[in-house]
Image: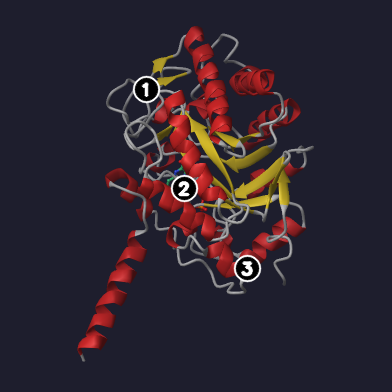
Amino acid sequence: MELKTLFSPGKIGKVQIKNRIIRSATFTNMASEQGNPTEEQIEFYTTLAKGGTGLIITEITSIDQIGKNANAQLCLDDDSQIAGHKELVDAVHEYSEVKIAPQLSHAGRNSFNPQHQPVAPSSIQNIVTKKTPRELTIEEIREIIKNFVDACGRAYESGYDLVQLNAGHGWLLSNFLSPFTNKRSDEYGGDTQNRTKILLDIYNQVKDEMGKKFPITIKLQTNDFIPEGLSLEEGIEIAKLLVDTGYCAIEASGGGIELIARGEKPYPSVVVKTPEDENFFLPSVQKLQQIKKDCSIILMGGVRNPLSAEKILQEKTADFIAISRPLIYEPDLPNRWENGDLSPPLCTSCNQCYGTVMAGSLHCPIKKKAERRKRREEKKKLNK
Ligand SMILES: Cc1cc2nc3c(=O)[nH]c(=O)nc-3n(C[C@H](O)[C@H](O)[C@H](O)COP(=O)(O)O)c2cc1C
Protein backbone atom coordinates (compact mmCIF):
# COMPACT_ATOMS: atom_id res chain seq x y z
CA MET A 1 0.00 0.00 0.00
CA GLU A 2 1.31 3.44 -0.92
CA LEU A 3 1.16 6.14 1.77
CA LYS A 4 -0.73 8.43 -0.60
CA THR A 5 -2.99 10.07 1.97
CA LEU A 6 -0.55 10.19 4.90
CA PHE A 7 1.79 12.31 2.80
CA SER A 8 -0.85 14.42 1.08
CA PRO A 9 -1.68 17.95 2.29
CA GLY A 10 -4.65 18.63 4.56
CA LYS A 11 -6.25 21.72 6.03
CA ILE A 12 -7.04 22.89 9.54
CA GLY A 13 -9.28 25.90 9.16
CA LYS A 14 -7.59 27.84 6.36
CA VAL A 15 -4.11 26.60 7.27
CA GLN A 16 -2.56 24.13 4.86
CA ILE A 17 -0.53 21.33 6.49
CA LYS A 18 1.95 19.63 4.13
CA ASN A 19 1.07 16.10 5.29
CA ARG A 20 -1.26 14.46 7.80
CA ILE A 21 1.32 13.96 10.53
CA ILE A 22 1.06 16.10 13.66
CA ARG A 23 3.45 16.06 16.59
CA SER A 24 1.19 15.78 19.64
CA ALA A 25 2.11 18.27 22.41
CA THR A 26 5.00 16.96 24.52
CA PHE A 27 6.50 18.84 27.45
CA THR A 28 10.28 19.28 27.09
CA ASN A 29 11.12 21.11 30.36
CA MET A 30 13.53 23.28 28.38
CA ALA A 31 12.07 26.81 28.63
CA SER A 32 13.67 29.72 30.48
CA GLU A 33 12.33 30.71 33.89
CA GLN A 34 10.56 33.65 32.19
CA GLY A 35 8.65 31.21 29.94
CA ASN A 36 10.68 31.88 26.80
CA PRO A 37 11.98 29.23 24.39
CA THR A 38 15.70 28.53 24.97
CA GLU A 39 18.36 27.75 22.34
CA GLU A 40 18.18 24.08 23.37
CA GLN A 41 14.42 24.12 22.78
CA ILE A 42 14.71 25.87 19.40
CA GLU A 43 17.26 23.26 18.36
CA PHE A 44 14.91 20.49 19.56
CA TYR A 45 11.99 21.83 17.50
CA THR A 46 14.03 22.53 14.37
CA THR A 47 15.25 18.91 14.51
CA LEU A 48 11.60 17.82 14.58
CA ALA A 49 10.79 20.18 11.70
CA LYS A 50 13.65 18.72 9.62
CA GLY A 51 12.27 15.24 10.36
CA GLY A 52 9.17 15.75 8.23
CA THR A 53 6.29 16.38 10.67
CA GLY A 54 3.62 18.57 9.03
CA LEU A 55 2.41 20.40 12.16
CA ILE A 56 4.28 20.65 15.45
CA ILE A 57 2.11 21.30 18.50
CA THR A 58 4.84 22.28 20.92
CA GLU A 59 3.89 21.70 24.54
CA ILE A 60 1.95 22.97 27.57
CA THR A 61 2.30 26.76 27.45
CA SER A 62 0.90 28.49 30.50
CA ILE A 63 -1.62 31.32 30.28
CA ASP A 64 -0.90 32.56 33.82
CA GLN A 65 1.47 31.97 36.74
CA ILE A 66 -0.89 29.83 38.89
CA GLY A 67 -1.48 27.52 35.94
CA LYS A 68 2.27 27.02 35.44
CA ASN A 69 3.35 23.55 36.51
CA ALA A 70 7.15 23.66 36.23
CA ASN A 71 9.89 26.28 36.23
CA ALA A 72 11.09 25.36 32.76
CA GLN A 73 7.67 25.65 31.13
CA LEU A 74 6.80 27.89 28.19
CA CYS A 75 4.39 30.76 28.97
CA LEU A 76 2.39 33.25 26.96
CA ASP A 77 1.13 35.32 29.87
CA ASP A 78 3.12 38.47 29.17
CA ASP A 79 3.86 40.55 26.06
CA SER A 80 7.59 40.35 26.85
CA GLN A 81 7.51 36.68 25.76
CA ILE A 82 6.37 37.42 22.18
CA ALA A 83 9.89 38.11 20.84
CA GLY A 84 11.26 34.81 22.20
CA HIS A 85 8.36 32.77 20.82
CA LYS A 86 8.77 34.52 17.47
CA GLU A 87 12.37 33.25 17.31
CA LEU A 88 11.13 29.68 17.79
CA VAL A 89 8.38 30.09 15.18
CA ASP A 90 10.75 31.67 12.63
CA ALA A 91 13.32 28.90 13.14
CA VAL A 92 10.70 26.18 12.51
CA HIS A 93 9.21 28.04 9.53
CA GLU A 94 12.58 27.84 7.79
CA TYR A 95 11.91 24.14 7.19
CA SER A 96 9.82 23.34 4.14
CA GLU A 97 6.36 24.56 5.12
CA VAL A 98 6.27 23.08 8.60
CA LYS A 99 3.52 24.64 10.72
CA ILE A 100 3.72 25.22 14.46
CA ALA A 101 1.23 25.82 17.31
CA PRO A 102 1.52 26.30 21.07
CA GLN A 103 -0.68 24.32 23.44
CA LEU A 104 -2.30 26.86 25.76
CA SER A 105 -2.70 25.33 29.20
CA HIS A 106 -3.57 25.83 32.82
CA ALA A 107 -2.58 22.99 35.18
CA GLY A 108 -5.75 23.11 37.33
CA ARG A 109 -6.00 20.04 39.62
CA ASN A 110 -2.87 18.51 38.03
CA SER A 111 -0.55 21.19 39.40
CA PHE A 112 2.62 20.08 41.20
CA ASN A 113 3.75 23.71 41.56
CA PRO A 114 4.92 24.13 45.19
CA GLN A 115 4.50 27.92 44.98
CA HIS A 116 0.72 27.91 44.64
CA GLN A 117 -2.26 25.98 45.91
CA PRO A 118 -3.86 24.50 42.77
CA VAL A 119 -7.19 25.94 41.62
CA ALA A 120 -10.08 24.06 40.02
CA PRO A 121 -13.83 24.31 39.44
CA SER A 122 -14.39 22.38 42.69
CA SER A 123 -12.31 21.47 45.69
CA ILE A 124 -11.60 17.76 45.09
CA GLN A 125 -8.27 16.20 46.06
CA ASN A 126 -5.93 14.91 43.35
CA ILE A 127 -4.86 11.43 44.48
CA VAL A 128 -1.43 11.66 42.81
CA THR A 129 -0.30 15.13 43.93
CA LYS A 130 -2.25 14.69 47.22
CA LYS A 131 -3.17 18.38 46.89
CA THR A 132 -6.69 19.72 47.28
CA PRO A 133 -7.39 22.61 44.94
CA ARG A 134 -9.14 25.79 45.96
CA GLU A 135 -12.51 26.34 44.24
CA LEU A 136 -12.37 29.21 41.74
CA THR A 137 -14.70 32.18 42.18
CA ILE A 138 -16.75 33.26 39.19
CA GLU A 139 -14.58 36.41 38.86
CA GLU A 140 -11.46 34.22 38.76
CA ILE A 141 -13.02 32.03 36.04
CA ARG A 142 -13.70 35.15 33.96
CA GLU A 143 -10.08 36.24 34.47
CA ILE A 144 -8.80 32.82 33.36
CA ILE A 145 -10.95 33.06 30.23
CA LYS A 146 -9.44 36.48 29.51
CA ASN A 147 -5.95 35.05 30.09
CA PHE A 148 -6.61 32.31 27.50
CA VAL A 149 -7.89 34.96 25.06
CA ASP A 150 -4.88 37.22 25.64
CA ALA A 151 -2.51 34.24 25.23
CA CYS A 152 -4.17 33.50 21.86
CA GLY A 153 -3.45 37.11 20.84
CA ARG A 154 0.21 36.74 21.87
CA ALA A 155 0.46 33.44 19.97
CA TYR A 156 -0.85 35.22 16.87
CA GLU A 157 1.60 38.09 17.34
CA SER A 158 4.44 35.54 17.69
CA GLY A 159 3.58 34.14 14.24
CA TYR A 160 2.21 30.74 15.29
CA ASP A 161 -0.01 29.22 12.59
CA LEU A 162 -2.79 28.19 14.98
CA VAL A 163 -3.34 27.40 18.67
CA GLN A 164 -4.43 24.31 20.55
CA LEU A 165 -6.22 24.57 23.90
CA ASN A 166 -5.33 21.84 26.36
CA ALA A 167 -8.66 20.44 27.56
CA GLY A 168 -7.35 16.96 28.25
CA HIS A 169 -6.24 14.58 30.96
CA GLY A 170 -6.84 16.47 34.19
CA TRP A 171 -5.70 19.98 33.26
CA LEU A 172 -7.94 22.88 34.22
CA LEU A 173 -10.17 23.01 31.15
CA SER A 174 -10.91 19.29 31.40
CA ASN A 175 -11.63 19.71 35.14
CA PHE A 176 -14.61 21.85 34.08
CA LEU A 177 -15.87 19.19 31.63
CA SER A 178 -15.90 16.26 34.04
CA PRO A 179 -18.86 15.65 36.38
CA PHE A 180 -16.30 14.11 38.80
CA THR A 181 -14.24 17.30 39.17
CA ASN A 182 -16.90 19.94 38.51
CA LYS A 183 -19.60 20.10 41.20
CA ARG A 184 -20.45 23.78 40.69
CA SER A 185 -24.02 25.00 40.74
CA ASP A 186 -23.44 28.29 38.86
CA GLU A 187 -23.32 28.90 35.10
CA TYR A 188 -19.97 26.98 34.81
CA GLY A 189 -21.27 23.75 36.39
CA GLY A 190 -24.25 21.42 36.28
CA ASP A 191 -25.42 20.12 32.89
CA THR A 192 -23.20 19.38 29.87
CA GLN A 193 -23.78 22.81 28.31
CA ASN A 194 -22.74 24.62 31.51
CA ARG A 195 -19.64 22.46 32.07
CA THR A 196 -18.60 23.26 28.47
CA LYS A 197 -19.33 26.99 28.84
CA ILE A 198 -15.70 27.92 29.63
CA LEU A 199 -14.60 26.52 26.25
CA LEU A 200 -17.42 28.28 24.41
CA ASP A 201 -16.63 31.58 26.16
CA ILE A 202 -12.93 31.37 25.26
CA TYR A 203 -13.72 30.66 21.60
CA ASN A 204 -16.36 33.41 21.33
CA GLN A 205 -14.15 36.01 22.99
CA VAL A 206 -11.20 35.18 20.72
CA LYS A 207 -13.54 35.48 17.74
CA ASP A 208 -14.84 38.85 19.00
CA GLU A 209 -11.27 40.15 19.32
CA MET A 210 -9.60 38.57 16.30
CA GLY A 211 -12.36 37.43 13.95
CA LYS A 212 -11.81 34.04 12.36
CA LYS A 213 -8.28 34.75 11.13
CA PHE A 214 -6.59 32.53 13.74
CA PRO A 215 -7.65 28.86 13.92
CA ILE A 216 -8.53 27.64 17.42
CA THR A 217 -8.15 23.89 17.93
CA ILE A 218 -8.46 21.73 21.02
CA LYS A 219 -7.08 18.57 22.61
CA LEU A 220 -10.27 17.28 24.17
CA GLN A 221 -11.03 14.94 27.02
CA THR A 222 -13.53 12.56 25.43
CA ASN A 223 -13.54 9.98 28.21
CA ASP A 224 -12.31 9.96 31.84
CA PHE A 225 -12.33 6.13 31.95
CA ILE A 226 -13.73 6.20 35.52
CA PRO A 227 -17.34 5.46 36.47
CA GLU A 228 -17.90 8.84 38.21
CA GLY A 229 -16.26 10.78 35.38
CA LEU A 230 -16.91 11.92 31.83
CA SER A 231 -18.29 9.13 29.64
CA LEU A 232 -17.46 8.83 25.94
CA GLU A 233 -21.12 9.55 25.18
CA GLU A 234 -21.01 12.88 27.02
CA GLY A 235 -17.55 13.64 25.61
CA ILE A 236 -19.11 13.49 22.13
CA GLU A 237 -21.98 15.78 23.23
CA ILE A 238 -19.35 18.28 24.37
CA ALA A 239 -17.51 17.93 21.06
CA LYS A 240 -20.77 18.69 19.23
CA LEU A 241 -21.08 21.97 21.12
CA LEU A 242 -17.48 22.84 20.18
CA VAL A 243 -17.98 21.97 16.50
CA ASP A 244 -21.14 24.12 16.37
CA THR A 245 -19.27 27.02 17.97
CA GLY A 246 -16.45 26.95 15.40
CA TYR A 247 -13.45 25.02 16.81
CA CYS A 248 -11.66 23.85 13.69
CA ALA A 249 -9.83 20.73 14.92
CA ILE A 250 -10.32 18.27 17.76
CA GLU A 251 -7.54 15.92 18.90
CA ALA A 252 -9.28 13.16 20.84
CA SER A 253 -7.78 12.36 24.24
CA GLY A 254 -8.81 11.06 27.63
CA GLY A 255 -7.70 9.71 30.99
CA GLY A 256 -5.11 11.43 33.19
CA ILE A 257 -2.42 10.89 35.83
CA GLU A 258 -4.88 9.71 38.49
CA LEU A 259 -5.75 6.58 36.48
CA ILE A 260 -2.29 5.16 37.26
CA ALA A 261 -2.86 5.61 41.01
CA ARG A 262 -6.18 3.79 40.61
CA GLY A 263 -4.38 0.87 38.94
CA GLU A 264 -6.13 1.54 35.61
CA LYS A 265 -4.72 1.64 32.07
CA PRO A 266 -2.61 4.84 31.91
CA TYR A 267 -4.48 6.84 29.24
CA PRO A 268 -3.33 8.92 27.39
CA SER A 269 0.11 7.23 27.51
CA VAL A 270 -0.87 3.58 27.23
CA VAL A 271 1.94 1.07 26.67
CA VAL A 272 1.81 -0.22 23.11
CA LYS A 273 3.18 -3.75 22.71
CA THR A 274 0.97 -5.41 20.10
CA PRO A 275 -0.99 -4.18 17.06
CA GLU A 276 -4.16 -4.53 19.20
CA ASP A 277 -2.78 -1.90 21.60
CA GLU A 278 -2.37 0.66 18.80
CA ASN A 279 -4.67 3.60 17.95
CA PHE A 280 -6.34 3.48 21.35
CA PHE A 281 -8.50 6.59 20.87
CA LEU A 282 -10.10 5.18 17.72
CA PRO A 283 -13.48 4.69 19.51
CA SER A 284 -13.56 8.44 20.26
CA VAL A 285 -12.46 9.42 16.77
CA GLN A 286 -15.03 7.19 15.08
CA LYS A 287 -17.80 8.97 16.99
CA LEU A 288 -16.31 12.43 16.43
CA GLN A 289 -16.18 11.83 12.71
CA GLN A 290 -20.00 11.51 12.69
CA ILE A 291 -20.51 15.02 14.11
CA LYS A 292 -17.52 16.85 12.66
CA LYS A 293 -18.95 19.27 10.01
CA ASP A 294 -15.95 21.51 8.99
CA CYS A 295 -13.88 20.48 12.00
CA SER A 296 -10.79 18.27 11.42
CA ILE A 297 -10.54 15.17 13.59
CA ILE A 298 -7.12 14.09 14.85
CA LEU A 299 -6.35 10.53 15.95
CA MET A 300 -3.75 10.50 18.73
CA GLY A 301 -2.58 7.69 21.01
CA GLY A 302 -0.54 4.66 20.00
CA VAL A 303 -0.30 5.53 16.32
CA ARG A 304 2.65 3.33 15.36
CA ASN A 305 1.99 1.70 12.01
CA PRO A 306 2.08 3.88 8.87
CA LEU A 307 -0.01 1.38 6.89
CA SER A 308 -2.77 1.35 9.46
CA ALA A 309 -2.58 5.19 9.67
CA GLU A 310 -2.93 5.35 5.89
CA LYS A 311 -6.01 3.09 5.99
CA ILE A 312 -7.62 5.20 8.75
CA LEU A 313 -7.03 8.37 6.72
CA GLN A 314 -8.14 6.81 3.43
CA GLU A 315 -11.37 5.60 5.03
CA LYS A 316 -11.83 9.13 6.44
CA THR A 317 -12.10 7.85 10.00
CA ALA A 318 -9.64 10.62 10.92
CA ASP A 319 -8.30 13.63 9.01
CA PHE A 320 -4.87 13.71 10.69
CA ILE A 321 -2.84 11.48 12.99
CA ALA A 322 -0.76 12.75 15.91
CA ILE A 323 2.31 11.16 17.50
CA SER A 324 4.23 11.94 20.68
CA ARG A 325 6.57 9.33 22.20
CA PRO A 326 8.00 7.77 18.98
CA LEU A 327 9.16 11.21 17.82
CA ILE A 328 11.27 11.59 20.98
CA TYR A 329 13.37 8.62 19.86
CA GLU A 330 13.10 9.30 16.12
CA PRO A 331 12.33 12.93 15.24
CA ASP A 332 12.83 11.94 11.58
CA LEU A 333 10.22 9.15 11.66
CA PRO A 334 7.94 10.89 9.07
CA ASN A 335 10.84 11.23 6.61
CA ARG A 336 11.81 7.60 7.20
CA TRP A 337 8.26 6.45 6.40
CA GLU A 338 7.99 8.74 3.39
CA ASN A 339 11.27 7.31 2.06
CA GLY A 340 9.86 3.80 2.19
CA ASP A 341 11.28 2.39 5.44
CA LEU A 342 8.01 1.32 7.07
CA SER A 343 9.51 -0.62 9.95
CA PRO A 344 7.86 0.15 13.32
CA PRO A 345 9.10 3.04 15.46
CA LEU A 346 12.08 2.22 17.70
CA CYS A 347 10.06 3.61 20.66
CA THR A 348 8.64 0.87 22.87
CA SER A 349 6.40 3.37 24.73
CA CYS A 350 8.09 2.37 28.00
CA ASN A 351 7.24 5.85 29.37
CA GLN A 352 10.76 6.42 30.73
CA CYS A 353 10.70 9.74 28.84
CA TYR A 354 8.27 11.01 31.50
CA GLY A 355 11.02 10.64 34.11
CA THR A 356 13.45 12.71 32.05
CA VAL A 357 11.29 15.85 32.22
CA MET A 358 11.04 15.56 36.01
CA ALA A 359 14.84 15.75 36.29
CA GLY A 360 15.98 17.70 33.23
CA SER A 361 15.37 17.99 29.50
CA LEU A 362 13.16 15.63 27.52
CA HIS A 363 14.96 12.73 25.90
CA CYS A 364 14.66 8.99 25.36
CA PRO A 365 16.88 7.15 27.89
CA ILE A 366 16.74 3.95 25.78
CA LYS A 367 18.09 5.83 22.77
CA LYS A 368 20.83 7.38 24.91
CA LYS A 369 21.87 3.92 26.16
CA ALA A 370 21.85 2.51 22.61
CA GLU A 371 24.01 5.39 21.40
CA ARG A 372 26.48 4.87 24.30
CA ARG A 373 26.69 1.14 23.50
CA LYS A 374 27.33 1.92 19.83
CA ARG A 375 30.10 4.38 20.70
CA ARG A 376 31.74 1.78 22.98
CA GLU A 377 31.63 -0.85 20.25
CA GLU A 378 33.10 1.54 17.69
CA LYS A 379 35.90 2.42 20.11
CA LYS A 380 36.61 -1.28 20.68
CA LYS A 381 36.83 -1.86 16.91
CA LEU A 382 39.27 1.05 16.52
CA ASN A 383 41.45 -0.29 19.33
CA LYS A 384 41.71 -3.77 17.77
C1 LIG B 1 7.13 13.18 28.22
C2 LIG B 1 5.73 13.47 27.78
C3 LIG B 1 5.24 14.77 27.87
C4 LIG B 1 3.93 15.06 27.47
N1 LIG B 1 3.50 16.36 27.49
C5 LIG B 1 2.25 16.67 27.05
C6 LIG B 1 1.82 18.01 26.95
O1 LIG B 1 2.58 18.96 27.17
N2 LIG B 1 0.54 18.23 26.57
C7 LIG B 1 -0.32 17.20 26.25
O2 LIG B 1 -1.47 17.45 25.92
N3 LIG B 1 0.08 15.92 26.27
C8 LIG B 1 1.34 15.63 26.64
N4 LIG B 1 1.78 14.32 26.60
C9 LIG B 1 0.88 13.28 26.07
C10 LIG B 1 1.14 13.06 24.57
O3 LIG B 1 0.86 14.22 23.82
C11 LIG B 1 0.26 11.94 23.97
O4 LIG B 1 -1.07 12.34 24.16
C12 LIG B 1 0.48 10.56 24.57
O5 LIG B 1 1.85 10.31 24.81
C13 LIG B 1 -0.05 9.45 23.64
O6 LIG B 1 0.48 9.56 22.35
P1 LIG B 1 1.67 8.57 21.82
O7 LIG B 1 1.16 7.16 21.98
O8 LIG B 1 1.89 8.95 20.39
O9 LIG B 1 2.85 8.83 22.68
C14 LIG B 1 3.08 14.01 26.98
C15 LIG B 1 3.59 12.72 26.89
C16 LIG B 1 4.89 12.44 27.26
C17 LIG B 1 5.41 11.03 27.11
Tell me, for residue 265, which label it has, or none: 2
Residue 119 versus residue 263: which sits nearer the camera?
119
Identity of the residue drawn at 47% across and 9% down:
137
Quick check: 237 above or below 368? above
Q: Are marks 1 and 2 in contact (CB under 8 Å)?
A: no
**Quarter occupied by the N terminus:** bottom right
- Residue under pointer 1: 118
Q: Residue type at mark 3: give it.
A: Glu
Callout 2: SS: loop
Q: Residue type at mark 2: give it.
A: Lys
Report, in whole angstroms, how far the alpha carbon at label 2 lies from the one at label 3. 32 Å
Task: Give the mark toward the camera: 2 or 3.
Answer: 3
Identity of the residue drawn at 48% across and 24% down:
181
Quick check: 255 above or below 375? above
Quick check: 344 above or below 286? below
For label 3, being within 8 Å of ligand 1 is answered no
Residue 349 versus residue 94: which sits nearer the camera?
94
Q: How is the image coloured?
A: secondary structure
Residue 102 versus residue 144: which sits nearer the camera?
102
Q: Residue type at mark 1: give it.
A: Pro
Is residue 271 something that shows in the picture? no
Which badge, 2 or 3, comes first in the chain's sequence?
2
**Would residue 7 be found to the left or right of residue 181 on screen?**
right
Callout 3: SS: helix
Tell me, for residue 164, which label it has, or none: none
Which badge, 1 or 3, comes first in the chain's sequence?
1
